[in-house]
Image: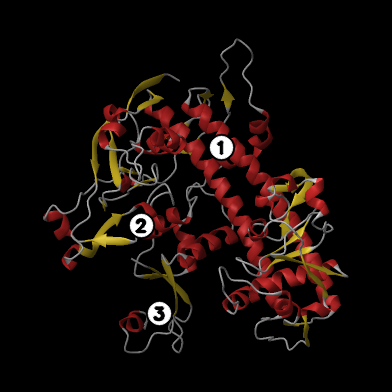
């Protein structure tokens, strides 16, 4: 793979900065043209609808800069290096610079990933003012190395895109596991705020002992207390922990331990200051200050129950907390808190479900860590010329052109991907341990690359293949038949309902009495009046 070294200015057709139209003129805003600000960037490769829009009049009056489609937007004031690719002509404010690459030299997707891995390089070249600024001259002068052959660039993009997709899938799996446990809690115990299952109410102190942590001296005023072998948990550690506290950022010395208390593994930590009623269970013996309460019941199942219980009561406790310098609740409030008291058999059943789910989450977390390591390793090697993708063959059915010709649909692979790392010596090329460890996962996923790998891809395909304003799930299934995509019912259903949650699609119930809550006078009601009595979906513009 032959690499070329140039500058951003030399691989760009144009580089220009956005504008903000005069805000006093209402005719310039709330139109059909996306107008991006830094908060819209770094969310996805291809940018979706912006949080604010402008009108054609703003562009006509030259009060806004219009970028052509496939321009890569870069945050160049403040948070340097936030990025995204536009899929249709769009505008931005003055904090963003747009780079339209010469695709005979560098394709925009390769440039996007190059920027992603070289964010620190952009920051280094910016002016160090009160607010960092990277002007167009500085941006243009930044050196960039890239494969001379654009097909090699596409191979790199495809591999990184696939690993990113796997990473997003792992993260979603972890999030879904958390949502499953919350749903299971509500199903088994009901809404604890309203006690919908009518359990007997008892004081929280009856379920287990509640005592404040101990720290007779503030560590910041006594550095000799810190730096030993005894874990020290702070409120921030608990707030960021999830169900279990598996790490710590500070330790006590023997002197620090002597003026504190060591709590046993299994203690449920409950914050009572700043971040109120956040919880986490210790997986190791640890100390904590008096801004944290230790809850020690007779059974582990009770700790699990109280952890999830606090998730529902947290907003109420925080709302009612007295505030001085910061919000806090005292031990008396926590001990006297009236909570539902479910049957112990049900608590033990819930404990089994939690343990099984947490085991699955650990597997996904380990896989996520491996994929992140793989991504960083591949990125480094890809942009330094050490990644040989010559065995990776793909078919471009039509010449790689613009987004309007389905730019976001992935290239199809003819054979198994072999990730081979080029060595500077004559030794036999071999992959790193990390790459070997997850090779099967990545190889299988890339070999059977789905034609529709994200909900955005599915939405694009629905627009082209589902006729009419409304369509059923069966219509969607028919639309994807014959594609190079092996899917099952659940996979397709999950993609569809993720689009519903993101409000790109809307569920329309065509029953004569329940037409999505529309009144009979609504145009939307009349629009579906002739549909049969089943569930339809509607594309939201």
Occupied quadrant, residue 253: top right
- Kindly report the distance in space between the C-alpha atoms of the residues bearing marks 2 and 3: 21 Å
Residue 415 in sight from this viewpoint: no
Tag 3 residue? 531
State the residue at coordinates (30%, 42%): 402
Whether 279 is drawn above or below 99: the answer is: below
| Gap between marks 1 and 2 measured at Cα | 33 Å
Residue 186: x %, y % from top left: 68, 76
In this rendering, position of residue 391 left or right of residue 174: left
Q: Secondary structure at mark 1?
A: helix
Q: Residues within 10 Å of mark 1 (few under 14, many from 20)?
A: many
Which label lies toward us, 3 or 1? 1
Q: Secondary structure at mark 3?
A: loop
Relative to 221, is 141 above or below? above
Q: Which residue is mark 1?
A: 375
Marks 3/1: CA distance? 48 Å
Are the two marked residues, 1 and 2, in contact with CB atoms closer than 8 angstroms? no
Q: Which residue is mark 2?
A: 464
Q: Quadrant of the C terminus?
A: bottom left
């Amino acid at each position: 793979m032959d690499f070329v070294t140039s500058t951003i200015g030399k691989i760009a057709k144009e580089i220009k900065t956005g504008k903000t139209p005069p805000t006093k003129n209402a005719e310039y805003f709330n139109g059909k043209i996306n107008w991006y600000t830094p908060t819209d960037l770094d969310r996805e490769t291809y940018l979706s609808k912006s949080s604010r829009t402008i009108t054609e009049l703003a562009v006509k009056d030259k009060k806004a800069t219009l970028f052509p489609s496939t321009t890569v937007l870069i945050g160049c004031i403040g948070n340097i290096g936030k990025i995204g690719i536009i899929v249709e002509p769009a505008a931005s404010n003055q904090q963003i610079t747009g780079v339209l690459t010469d695709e005979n030299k560098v394709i925009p997707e390769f440039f996007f990933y190059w920027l992603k891995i070289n964010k620190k390089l952009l920051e280094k070249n910016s002016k160090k003012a009160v607010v960092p600024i990277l002007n167009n001259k500085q941006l243009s002068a930044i050196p960039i190395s890239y494969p001379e052959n654009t097909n090699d660039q596409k191979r790199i993009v495809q591999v990184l895109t696939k690993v990113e997709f796997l990473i997003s899938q792992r993260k979603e799996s972890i999030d879904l596991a958390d949502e499953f446990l919350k749903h299971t809690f509500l199903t088994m115990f009901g809404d604890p705020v309203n006690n919908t299952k009518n359990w007997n109410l008892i004081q929280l102190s009856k379920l287990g002992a509640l005592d404040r942590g101990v720290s007779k001296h503030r560590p910041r005023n006594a550095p000799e207390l810190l730096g030993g072998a005894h874990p020290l948990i702070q409120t921030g550690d608990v707030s960021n922990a999830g169900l279990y506290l598996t790490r710590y950022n500070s330790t006590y010395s023997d002197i620090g331990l002597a003026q504190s208390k060591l709590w046993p593994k299994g203690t449920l930590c409950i914050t009572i200051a700043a971040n109120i009623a956040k919880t986490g269970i210790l997986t190791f013996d640890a100390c904590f200050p008096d801004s944290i309460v230790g809850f020690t019941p007779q059974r582990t199942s009770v700790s699990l129950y109280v952890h999830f219980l606090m998730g529902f009561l947290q907003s109420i406790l925080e709302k009612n907390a007295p505030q001085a310098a910061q919000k806090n609740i005292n031990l008396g409030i926590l001990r006297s808190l009236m909570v539902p008291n479910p049957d112990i058999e049900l608590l033990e059943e819930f404990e089994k479900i939690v343990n099984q789910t947490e085991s699955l989450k650990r597997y996904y977390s380990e896989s996520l860590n491996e994929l992140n390591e793989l991504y960083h390793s591949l990125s480094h090697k890809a942009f330094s010329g050490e990644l040989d993708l010559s065995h990776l063959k793909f078919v471009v059915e039509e010449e790689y052109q613009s987004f309007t010709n389905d730019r976001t649909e992935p290239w199809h692979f003819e054979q198994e991907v072999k990730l081979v790392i080029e060595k500077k010596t004559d030794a036999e090329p071999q992959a790193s341990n990390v790459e070997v460890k997850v090779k099967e996962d990545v190889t299988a996923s890339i070999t059977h690359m789905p034609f529709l790998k994200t909900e955005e891809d599915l939405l694009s395909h629905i627009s082209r293949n589902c006729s009419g304003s409304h369509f059923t799930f069966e219509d969607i299934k028919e639309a994807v038949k014959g594609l190079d995509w092996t899917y099952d019912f659940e996979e397709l259903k999950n993609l569809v309902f993720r689009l519903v949650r993101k409000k790109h699609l809307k569920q329309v119930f065509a029953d004569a009495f329940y037409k999505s809550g529309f009144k009979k006078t609504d145009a939307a009601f009349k629009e579906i009046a002739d549909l049969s009595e089943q569930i339809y979906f509607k594309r939201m513009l």
